[in-house]
Amino acid sequence: MSTVAPPLLDIESLRITSPARVLVEDCTLSVASGEVVGLIGESGSGKSLSLRAVVGLLDARLTQSGRISVDGKNLDALDKAARRRVRSHSMGVVFQTPRAHLNPLRSIGDFMTEALTCVAGVSASEAEVRAESLLEEVGITDPRRRMRQHPGDLSGGLLQRVMIASALAMEPQLLLADEMTTALDVTVQEEVMAVLLDLQRERGLGILFVTHDLQLARAVCDRIAVMSAGRIVETIPAARLDNAVEPYTRALVASSTLSRQPAATDSEAASEPILEVRGLRREFMVRKARGWGREPFVAVDGVDLTLGAGRALAVVGQSGSGKTTTARIICGLERADAGTVTVQGEDWSQPARSVRERRHRAAMAQMVFQDPYQSLDPRQSVESCLAEAVRLQEPGSADAVRERVRELVRSVALDESVLDRTPRSLSGGQRQRVAIARALAARPKLLVLDEAVSALDVTVRAEILDVLEEIRHDAGVALLMITHDLDVAERLCSHVVVMRAGRVIESGPVAEVFSAPAESYTRTLLASIPRPGWVPRRRG
Amino acid sequence: MSAAPSVARPSLQRAWRTARGGPGVIVAGAALAAIVASAALGPLVAPYDPHQPFVGQPFEPASFEHWLGTDAIGRDVLSRILAGAPGSVLPPFVVAVGATLLGAIVGVTAAWCGRAVDWWLSRVVDVIFAVPGLVLAVLAVAMFGKGLVAPSIALVISSLPLTARLIRVTARVELSKPYVEALHVQGTGRLAVWGRHLAPALAPTLLAQATIGFAYAMLDLAAISYLGLGVQPPSADWGSMIADGQAAILQGHPGQSLAAATLVLATVLSVSVLGAHATTWAEGTDT
Amino acid sequence: MLRRVLAQLGGLLSTLVIASAVIFGALVLTPGDPVSAIIGGVQPTPELIAQVRADHHLDAPVWERYLQWVGGILSGDLGQSMVYKTSISALLAPRIAVTATLVAYAATIVALVGIGSGILASRGGPWDQAVLVSTTVGLAMPTFVVAILLVWVFARLLGWFPVLGVGDGGWDTLRHLTLPAVSLAIIYIAYVSRITRGSLVAQQTREHVETARVRGIPSARIFRAHVLRNASPQILAVSGTTFASMFATAAIAEQAFGLGGVGALFTEAASRKDIPVVQVIALLMVSIFVAANALVDIIAALIDPRSDRTHA
């Protein structure tokens, strides 16, 4: 690391305030040439806001103070044109959702060459040649064809490579990445990270890597700044993360590494199956890629799974593997084209036909959805929401309902004061607890959790997982966890089913499958999860 | 269900605070109150017989006897405005309410029944959308003769499908939200889902549609009367009074036309301002 | 893309067929005897009635008369006016010229002022406020109200513009049509301005525009290549329907300024129950709407190369 040259990026005492409150305070951070610096924190910690201040995308209603220097030039000391020049020439930015960050109406080629022709004044033909070689550098084959295509024609992983390539178009030494792999599947994340780190080494780039994923950050970064509630609480070398002194950092590390609970594996003795799925199949009609009309797409293709009473089973897989559709069929939100679903000896293969039947099934199986912001009626208070669920199963006096509602709230470790509030004023974690409480109102024997902790911050996720484990252990509720996160599966479940492209490719006890996977896909899946010492590799 | 805590509503205080709004809202509210009062009581309190010529000289300027002056044959303009108020305000109101209610019924039915009804609804919407409301209203006059009844029905027909489609889309969007699936899994009956959860979600849209519908109906019906296809002499509404007074403008007596035009404008503006405000307020209870 | 355009055209054509059938059918089923309307005040003799019924094909079944009617229109025979006793083509020809000029004039004003002020307002600041207030008033200003205000101020008080007739062609016609065109344009200016502002603002806050800003693309180019271009399909669509409905609203401007246009003829025909004329003009209005929409769809398809436009 050179100490003579000024750092590529030097942020000093950055402070960002909205009219109502302070959002970021005393943020000091630097990125030297050839260095990858992680900026991690939970949602609302101010990490993305700080990055937006650096690139000049802060909302006009916010005010910022402090000093941001790029290549030793203080941005505030420059006039508007010079500031834009420094930003466009000295830094590249990669955002979270590449699809939203590319103009859908313009071709990839237009996007790649735009900055070169409009900002650097390169000729159109020269820009095209350079764009092509950049795309090749990020591992895009047949770049000439890709450049004629539009963002809608490319997958998310490819688009993120295009973003990386375009961020490097002006040959900057500094790259800013804002949650750049958060929207991607783990195997795709690994490929994109491999591309990024190769470029970083070849070009000696300095990278500010903003992410909520501590495991990913510690695997790819040299130093890590931990942000919480608008402040950087600690900046330490990634290797020393386990020895952090700050309590917040320690808590973050602890909740990011989910330890497996012995309770999840204890009951080796056979238990009655509560849920049995055999040969489940579901096709959707999708628009054909070419020509007129529609064609069938097999979302779920002959799925078998068994869940014992009071046990926890994880269904893992990447997006498009059919795991969510399977869960929806079990809960009667989707019909099956073939196969059977049996819950406690009853045939649930098709959705309930009458409200009575639905209510009967509700008393046995309940579902918790992924997005806690959307799974509660925004106009309904928590009390009204829970009371409605209680009355469906146990119509009783107002007092009895009130008492049961309070009991439910306590069972998910929420304070009774949330009862008067509407979902809008609750945090994501609180909302998900309400959703779980609502599911428990029917006293179900089976809880289907569709990515129920994926949208939550790690510390909240750990708490919710504790609540779920308690429910399973104490009330004997069987859990069917639909998740893309193998750590979550390992934390809570004794058995796992791995799905890919609608099929179950491997299943068995978690300990066996995860330590000695039989299928190469499972191995790839496990290998692409960032862990200490993980090195992303390009595959295939 | 009476003992149940109902769907959360903003507190009365907050409602009052937001409903009060800015000065624009107060002015609009006062103006609309005055217009509604004149529509309700106007014909009774009119100082002169609106059809009686030469209660004054032709084209008298505003005076204490004739607050808005007199027209070409010496009729009292204020009395004619007041007498025309019910005929100017009531039909658009009926059209707006009718089109919104019928549109809501059709839209909700389409959302409830699904694809087949949906398909037919969008075909009907496409065709009706291709015929401007004014053309349909004139067609109605050609079929059933002059007057405001046929054009009013035509305007209901012309705006109903759009409301229906909007309600259908809004309902579909709401129904596709995960919380509705959660209710489904929980075993909530369909009627309860629609009555307790969907209806409040549709309210802002309906309110907005009703106010927009009123404004358009008012302008279109006034246009029909202005074209001489609506209210027939000696009766008058504001639209026909604008037309009636137009010849006098070139002689330098714009009073009657301006008075009637001002009222049309004031009504449409105040309803729009209040409607926009009410819609924002209703949406405020949403996320 | 060709596929999409063809599908659109097919849909519009079917709309046209259904609309024409409804227009024809409704007016055939009109209460009252068409014969008496045709004959007017003359004492009807059985021979005269038979003659009239034969002349107007009143005895054939409705669908046959509909096909005859459509066939006639396609071959250029629009039928006879019951009131004027002349061919409708002869009645329409001079009036179409008047209305087309008026609407073209007004549409030009709407496009320039409406889209222009929308762009101005999308930049924010005091202009945005000014445009917001004036479009709120504008949206409540129907053609006939604007017309009397213009007549009063510009014709009576200032005497700048003539208020009757279409003038002697060229510059004089333009002068005669200025007040009518402005009165027709005001409410549409407000509407188009609002839509333009709305879709531009929506595009300005899109993430891909942020990307362009971060990359240092000059703001003029961002506006042109990313904001305006992405908003243009919506602005175009609204402009298309606006243009089409101006043909209908033109009736009011024509009445206000004593112009002998299609709209004035439409009003007159409706009030005198001249059914064949009403039918033809209603069909004309619908056809203009369908044609304007078809045109807009084709242009939008050229602007937006994607096969799936749901994310526009």
Image (cartoon, coloured by chain):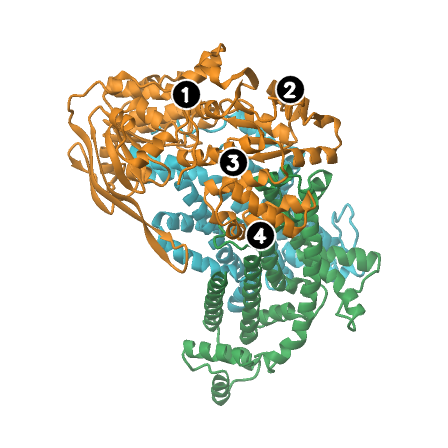
In 3D space, how far apart are the residues under numbered discs 2 and 1 (Cα atoms)?
A: 34 Å
Give the secondary structure at mark 1: helix
**Residue holding disc 4:** C234
Give coordinates of residue A77: x percent, y percent. 75, 26
Chain C palette colour: green
**Residue holding disc 3:** B283
* Residue at image point 63% right, 78% down: C91
Chain A palette colour: orange
Residues at marks 4 and 3, common chain? no
Residue at the top extreme, as displayed: A245
> Type of residue at label 3?
Glu
Label 2 vs 1, first from the N-terminus:
2
To which quarter of the image does residue A518 belong?
A: top left
Judged left or right of residue B260, residue A376 is left
> Type of residue at label 1?
Ser
| Number of other residues with Cα within 10 Å of mark 1, as a class: few under 14, some 14 to 19, many 20 or more | some
> Type of residue at label 2?
Thr
Mark 4 belongs to chain: C
In 3D space, how far apart are the residues under numbered discs 4 and 3 (Cα atoms)?
A: 25 Å
Question: Does the rendering let one see residue A325?
Answer: yes
Chain B palette colour: cyan
Give the secondary structure at mark 3: helix
**Residue holding disc 1:** A256
**Residue holding disc 2:** A3
Mark 3 belongs to chain: B
* Residue at image point 27% right, 31% down: A517
Residues at marks 1 and 4, common chain? no
Which mark is drawn over residue A63?
Answer: none
> Type of residue at label 4?
Gln
